[in-house]
Image: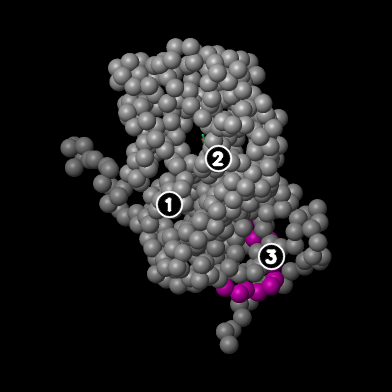
Amino acid sequence: MDKKAFERPYIKKLQAGMPSKFGMKPQVEPLTHIDDNGVADLIGEFGSPLFVISEKTIRETYKKAKHAFTTRYPKVQFAWSYKTNYLDAVCRVFHSEGSWAEVVSGFEYDKALLNGVKGSQIIFNGPDKTDEDLKKAVENDSLIHIDHFDEMYAILALSETLGKKPKVAIRVNMDTGVYPMWDRFGFNYENGDAWDAINRIMINEKLELVGLHAHIGTYMMTANTYKIAALKLADLAYGIEKKYGAHIKYIDVGGGFASQNTLKGAYYPGTDTTPSFSEYAEAISSAILNSNLDPRSLPTLILETGRALVDDAGYLLGTVIANKRLSSGNRATIVDVGVNLLFTSFWYAHEVYPAAPVSEHLEETTLYGPLCMNIDVLREAIAFPLLKKGDHFVVKRIGAYNMTQWMQFITLRPNVVMIDTEGRPHVIRKREEMENIRGQEQIPAHLA
Ligand SMILES: *Cc1c(COP(=O)(O)O)cnc(C)c1O
């Protein structure tokens, strides 16, 4: 039997098992395996820290979301939001499930093409599309979602030089009752800009208006905001039917469904408060089905869901470097996972689990990353068991936005592994090496 680690005595207020105003009873169940792979084995083979993605979870989550929508609306298409996680292996899982690609830069656009997505199944969003990007998108028959009038004029000019009729949609921003409103993207619904854009496209006939798009925000906590957005888009589509006798091919309600992570400062855990796919689907489909749109030619419903489809599939594994006492006497546990790898720790209270059974005594602990920066805090003052130097832990629900927004800072980025549906791990992004960084640098002759 192993000798038990010494834990200093302390006084603790008793808490019952029910949620109180201080939240839920703290949990310490360890998370020892991911899709049948032992956490310690994964770290032994691929190093620490380590990003792990469960292909099985991605596919299951996708199927759940798809089912929620296809049971409620006749024509549904998902488009994978590249910026949420554009590791090629991840994108290919979504594409193999039938997802199109949703991109917001020339770089992401090229990545989608390299992943084998047909040009006509790439949705090109965002405020920054260069003339070169637009030319490529027009030539490939991609769906260009216009953000502003300058972009519309650029596409009009291209349609003449290329002798093609570009397929476009307009991005519409609107008041959905959530503030601050995201009104910096696209054309406003309430002030008439959206109609101004529509009329310019419909009247000059050089562009084909195939869709209407909105992306109202991210981590939207109420399904009703989508109902309002879908109602307003359906209203525009109906107006187009009446005024021009033209049918809009699709209504794209964007992304933004909340994942089950808990926001910092939230009263209850995200697992209890975020709407389900069914609730979002019910709100959106009822808005379109009950609109005045011609039921014989209903538009396809496009969803650009990112976060809610991939967050649960991602884990970040790490190792304890040391424990120490702060001047306040509080425990500090220093780990090898920093905020440079876990960008979302700035707004989520991520769940952290020991990777092996531990003592049941919880003590207020702050988890610090390895960076020599005061801001490098993974979790502040959480009830946490004692993990010793060399012990492993798992941060849950980190699949969205971390593997695209991570920073190379002080340390190099670690391996990313995907566990396939048979339980076999594969490296899908190799750990960075000195040469990856130095290879980009150049020494001026006088310093050589
Ligand atoms: C970021 C983004 C998405 C995905 O948003 P999530 O919050 O990750 O679902 C979808 N569409 C557009 C236009 C985006 O910018």
Label 1 lies in ligand 1 vicinity (Cβ under 8 Å): no
Name the spot of residue 167 as percent of width and height, x first.
42, 26
Q: Residue at x 24, y 40 (%)?
A: 442
Q: Is residue 189 above or below residue 433?
A: above
Which span of residues is magenta-colored?
A: 356-366
Toward the bottom, the furthest residue is 1
Please state the total of marks drawn on the protein image: 3
Which one is in front in this view, the residue at disc 3 or the one at disc 2? 2
Badge 3 or badge 2: first in the primary sequence: 3
Q: Give the residue pinned by disc 3.
A: 27
Q: Is residue 108 above or below residue 354?
A: above
**Element carrying mark 2:** loop
Asked if residue 429 can be seen in this view, the reply is: yes
Q: How is the image coloured?
A: one colour
**Element carrying mark 3:** loop
* Residues tagged 1 and 2 counted as in contact (Cβ below 8 A): no
Amino acid type of the residue tagged 3 in the rendering? Gln
Disc number at residue 75?
2
Name the spot of residue 48 as percent of width and height, x first.
44, 63
Quadrant of the frame with the N terminus = bottom right
**Element carrying mark 1:** helix
